Image (spheres, coloured by chain):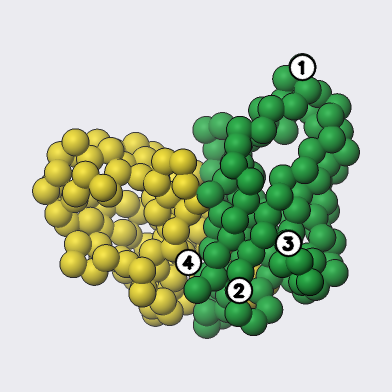
Amino acid sequence: GDSVTQMEGPVTLSEEAFLTINCTYTATGYPSLFWYVQYPGEGLQLLLKATKADDKGSNKGFEATYRKETTSFHLEKGSVQVSDSAVYFCALSDTIGAGNMLTFGGGTRLMVKP
Amino acid sequence: EAGVAQSPRYKIIEKRQSVAFWCNPISGHATLYWYQQILGQGPKLLIQFQNNGVVDDSQLPKDRFSAERLKGVDSTLKIQPAKLEDSAVYLCASGLGGGSTDTQYFGPGTRLTVL
C-alpha cells in the first residue's frame, strides 16, 4: 500500500538557518503530494502542494519539488523564523470518488531558537 | 470564510462508555473526512463522505465506530463502546471534491481521553 516516510524530529535550528525536512513516498499510480503544518494548539493547515512530477509547491518561503525519479518531496526554507516552530507532515493522496485519501507521514517537529 | 467546526474540543470518558463528535464542514464542500491522530503519529483516515454517501470506510472499526452525514452537511462520529486505545485526536476535514488534487481543510480536532 501507499506509505510516506519523513525524517524523525525534533529538528532544532537557530533563527535564519536553512531548513530541510526529508520526505519519501511509496505509491501506485500518480499521487499528489502535500505538506501540512500544525502549529501548537491549532489544527492542520495546508502549507503547499504539488500535483505532478517536477512541480514545485511554494508558500510563506517554504518550497518542495515533486521528484518522481527519487520518490521524494523534501521541504526547504532558506531562513527559518521562531514563528515556524511547529510539526510538519508530509502526505500523499490517492483519488477516492470525488475526493482523495491522504496518507500521512509521522510528522517532524521543528523548533527554532532565537 | 468560516473554517471547519468541531465539538467538543476535549472529552474524557471511561472505557466501555460511548461518545459522539460533531463536525460542520466549510459551506459548499462536497467531501468530508474523519481522521484519527494518535499522539506522535500522523492522522489516519477513518471514513470519507461525498455529499451524504460513504465513499470509503475500509479503515473504520465498524464493530465500535459509526459515522453519518445527514443531508450532506454536518457529520457525527460515534464510538460505542470506547476502548483505551481509542484515546486520540479526532480530526474532521472537508474539501470541494477535486479528486487527487483536492485540498482538505481541517478542523481543530476533538481530543478524546479514555480512562
Q: Label 2, on which residue?
A: A27
Q: Secondary structure at mark 4?
A: strand
Q: Is residue B113 above or below residue B67?
A: above
Q: Return the residue at label 4.
A: B32
Q: Nearer the viewer, mark 1 or mark 2?
A: 2
Q: Colour of chain B?
A: yellow
Which of the 4 quarters of the picture holds residue A4?
bottom right
Measured in 3D between alpha carbons, the distance from the residue under mark 4 to the one under mark 2, in whole angstroms, is 23 Å
Residue located beneath label 1 in the image: A114
Q: Mark 2 or 3 closer to N-term? A: 2
The mark closer to the camera, 4 or 1, is 1
Q: Amino acid at mark 2?
A: Ala
Q: Chain of mark 3?
A: A
Q: Chain of mark 2?
A: A
**Circles 1 and 2 in contact, beta carbons < 8 Å:** no
Tell me, yes or no, if residue B29 can be seen here: no
**Label 2: how many residues lie within 10 Å, few (<14), some (14-19) or many (20+)?**
some
Chain A's colour?
A: green
Residue farthest along the front direction in this orientation: A70
Q: Is residue A79 visible?
A: yes
Are labels 1 and 2 on one chain? yes
Rendering quarter of residue A64? bottom right
Nearer-the-camera pick, B100 or B76:
B100
Q: Position of residue A67 (x, y in %)?
A: 79, 66
Judging by the rendered image, the residue that carries numbered circle 3 is A72
